[in-house]
Amino acid sequence: YAKPKISTSITPIASIVSMLTENNAEISAINLVAGCPHHYQMRPSDKEKLASAKILIYIDDHFDGYAAHLASNFKGRVVKISEFESINFIDGDDHKNWHFWLDLDNVLALQEELATIIKLEIPELAKIVDDNMNKAKAKIKSLKHLKKHDLASHREIVMLSHSFAHFIKGMDGPI
C-alpha cells in the first residue's frame, strides 16, 4: 500500500502536517533550506516532490512564491494558508509576520483547518487524523503551559529575530 503524498512549501508546515498524519502519509517539504523562503531559488528536482501528491500546502504568494508557481500546474488540491481567516498573521506590533507557526494558537488553528482538508481529500486517513488531532492538541497545550510558566519566569528575553515576535506575543516581562 502506497502512502498518500502531501507536499508543503517549508519544513515547519511539513512538521505540523506530520503531527496529524504521523507515518501514514509521505510528507515532503519543497524548501529544505533553513534560509528565508522569500529568496528560495527553485531547482528542477522541486517539481518531483509534487509528483503524485494529493495536496500542496503553502503560505502565500508573497512569502513562498516558488510554491505558488508550482501550484499553477498542480493537479491535486492546493491549499494557501493565507486564505484561512483563523490564522493571525499580525505580530505584537501590528505588522504582517508570515512566521505565524511560532504562535501556538495559530498552530492549533492550522491543524484544525488542515485536518478538515486532509480528511476530505484523503478519506482513508480520517480516523488517523482525528486521533492525532487530539494528541496534537495535548502537545500544544503542554507547550503553551511551558511558555506561560517556565519561559515567562525568565527575567529577560532578547529577541534576535522579528519573526520570533509571534512566539513571545502575549508574554509578560522584559523583552
Image (spheres, rainbow, N blue to C red):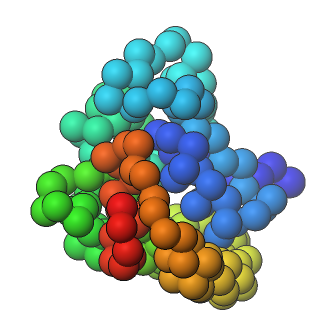
Residue 111: x and y, percent? 50, 72
Q: Residue at x 38, y 74 (%)?
A: 173
Which quadrant: the N terminus?
Answer: bottom right
Residue 91 lies in quadrant: bottom left
Between 37 and 3, the one lying in front of the other is: 37
Give the side of residue 163 with respect to residue 82, left or right. right
Q: Residue at x 58, y 61 (%)?
A: 16
Residue 5: x and y, percent? 65, 48
Q: Can residue 72 be spotted in the picture?
A: no
Q: Can residue 33 be spotted in the picture?
A: yes
Which quadrant: the C terminus?
Answer: bottom left
Between 84 and 50, the one lying in front of the other is: 84
Q: How many marks?
A: 0
Give the side of residue 61 with respect to residue 101, left or right. left
Residue 174: x and y, percent? 36, 67
Point out the residue furthest to the left here.
94
Point out the residue furthest to the right here.
1
Q: Residue at x 45, y 63 (%)?
A: 156
Q: Is residue 32 above or below residue 152?
A: above
Residue 65 lies in quadrant: top left
Residue 2: x and y, percent? 80, 49
Q: Is residue 173 above or below residue 55?
A: below
Point out the residue furthest to the front here.
155
Between 107 and 150, the one lying in front of the other is: 150
Give the side of residue 38 with respect to residue 115, left or right. left
